[in-house]
Amino acid sequence: MQGSILSVLVILALVAQDRLAGGLEHKSYDYTKYHTMDEISAWMDQIEKESPDVVSSMMYGQTYEKRNIKLLKIGFNSTTPKKAVWMDCGIHAREWIAPAFCQHFVKEILGSYKTDSKVNTLFKNLDFYVTPVLNMDGYIYSWKDNTTRLWRKSRSPGPENCTCFGTDLNRNFYANWGMVGISRNCCSEIYNGPTVLSEPEAKAVTDFLGAHQNQMLCYLTIHSYGQLILVPYGHPNISAPNYDELMEVGLAAAKAIKAVHGKSYKVGTSPDVLYANSGSSRDFARLIGIPYSFTFELRDEGQHGFILPENQIQPTCQEAYQGAMSIINYIHDKNFKSAAITVTATLWTTLTALWISSTCVF
Ligand SMILES: *[C@@H]1O[C@H](CO)[C@@H](O)[C@H](O)[C@H]1NC(C)=O
Ligand SMILES: *[C@@H]1O[C@H](CO)[C@@H](O)[C@H](O)[C@H]1NC(C)=O
Ligand SMILES: *[C@@H]1O[C@H](CO)[C@@H](O)[C@H](O)[C@H]1NC(C)=O
Ligand SMILES: *[C@@H]1O[C@H](CO)[C@@H](O)[C@H](O)[C@H]1NC(C)=O
Ligand SMILES: [Zn+2]
């Protein structure tokens, strides 16, 4: 009798402990599958609940269909303002590997910051702002049935007398809007919208980046497919002031990607390696002064295209993670090594001054 009461208590205690630890759901989340928007939203809540010391979430806008656009902010708490890295996934609905990558990225950094001193240092000096799915309405629509699977755009209705829906969010930003690589036909896949920033999703990112402009070191936007790393700008006649450095950093990332599973990624401006375009989020980020801005076009090169099989999620994310980390570590080291040297120099000056003053006294 007493024994059975005891075992019931022990079981209750174990259940309660599991509830409190909250680690079960995230650990059992299947990162090798594509997930619905509901599952991704629940995953975000879970991630935040599991690591409240380093993760918080922020809502920074609403989609056309009034869904809350949320990001995860990840890094150590700080009393002083920190520099930051932005990552968004799922601007284009059908590119399902992109949201899968944002989730993989979050899982990896949260799984390693306690043991990997490099990631630990990133958490000290930087905040990561990660939006797993920006175009939530479109993403949900792409999950509806197999006739909507290849949906790309937002879900806002077209202008008067147009029967088509949706604007290409990556043509809607305030960056040479409407100039090249766009369509004014509202039925086109690359319709740039009735006006610049007509889409609330593009507006939300614009407002957030604008408000955090001085703090953002890096803007990463994840797409598929093509195996490319794109640098600003999409307009063929405009060049980024740090184009050479962007290319150097992009090529190093491609090398890091290749080292994982042997996949080749091309690096260049959109007109050089893909096609000219305007109104992209990448170009907007660079135009407002965020120095390092890149688009990743993940696997593959067209064999499966947007319908990348689930057995490629893991390898695609593993290699892209190394690519992203190559960029982030470069930017981090460039910004914070010099700070370390300054501290050391100041220390030496102080010590020398002390030594001189001590020799004078005695
Ligand atoms: C930061 O510190 C505050 C106060 O200690 C705490 O409430 C919060 O959960 C911490 N984490 C984040 C990510 O803000
Ligand atoms: C779409 O789904 C229907 C019903 O499940 C099926 O009959 C059809 O073959 C599918 N079409 C494509 C293009 O996969
Ligand atoms: C829409 O179509 C109606 C009927 O053809 C026409 O009167 C109206 O001017 C059109 N509106 C626009 C904005 O083209
Ligand atoms: C780029 O400049 C060339 C030469 O001036 C011009 O012919 C071309 O139209 C320009 N391209 C765009 C997209 O404006
Ligand atoms: Zn895309």
Image (tube, rainbow, N blue to C red):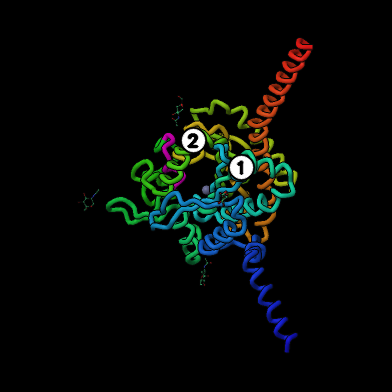
Residue closest to the eye, 197 or 273: 197
SS of the residue under disc 1: strand
Q: Which residue is mark 1?
A: 228
Amino acid identity at mark 1: Leu
Residue closest to the eye, 57 or 17: 17
Answer few, some or many: residues within 10 Å of disc 1's Cα (few below 14, many 20 plus, some between 14 and 19): many
Residue drawn at x 52%, y 60% as measured from the top left? 41
Residue drawn at x 31%, y 53% as measured from the top left? 162
Where residue 284 sits: x, y (%)?
47, 37
Residue drawn at x 39%, y 58% as measured from the top left? 65
Q: Quadrant of ligand 4?
A: top left
- The quadrant holding residue 3 is bottom right
Q: Which residue is mark 2?
A: 213
Q: Distance from label 1 to label 2 (Cα)? A: 26 Å
Q: Quadrant of the N terminus?
A: bottom right
Q: Quadrant of the C terminus?
A: top right
Res 90 visible:
no
Looking at the rendering, the stretch of residues picked out in magenta corresponds to 169-176
